[in-house]
Amino acid sequence: TRALTLEPKLAAARNALGVLALQRGDLAGAEREIAAINDKLAANHGGDWQKLHGLVADKEKLEARLRSWMSEWEKLGSELES
């Protein structure tokens, strides 16, 4: 019976680990995208302020998504520890 009570916890832990692995890839991808946008922002934009504004907007969206994912990552990690 003890094994039966542990099974749901183990299944939840396995699921959380799977989610963490997927999010790790998402986090790395978002960080690469932000770095690429930073490179574009640092490059000569030739006075194209619309393009520059678009890049800043894209970067802000990615950073917000990254913060959200990091929060979820930390929450799942805490759940696994408890």
Image (cartoon, helix red, strand yellow):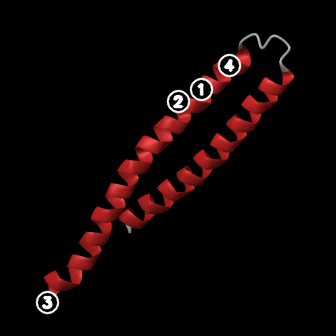
From the viewer's perspective, is 26 left or right of 34? left
Q: Position of residue 80 (x, y in %)?
A: 37, 64
Q: Amino acid at mark 4?
A: Lys
Quadrant showing the N terminus: bottom left
Indicate which disc, 4 or 1, sits on the residue closer to the N terminus: 1
> What is the quadrant of residue 50 in the picture?
top right
CA separation, marks 2 and 4? 13 Å
Within-10-Å neighbours for mark 1: few <14, some 14–19, many 20+: few
Residue under label 3: 1
Q: Amino acid at mark 3?
A: Thr
> What is the quadrant of residue 56 in the picture?
top right
Q: Position of residue 29 (x, y in %)?
A: 49, 36
Q: Residue at x 68, y 43 (%)?
A: 61
CA separation, marks 3 and 1? 52 Å
Residue under label 2: 32
Q: Position of residue 53 (x, y in %)?
A: 81, 30
Indicate which disc, 2 or 4, sits on the residue closer to the N terminus: 2
Q: Secondary structure at mark 4?
A: helix
Q: Residue at x 59, y 45 (%)?
A: 66
Q: Residue at x 83, y 18 (%)?
A: 48
Q: Do residues under tags 1 and 2 come within 8 Å of each other at their CB atoms?
A: yes
Q: Secondary structure at mark 3?
A: loop
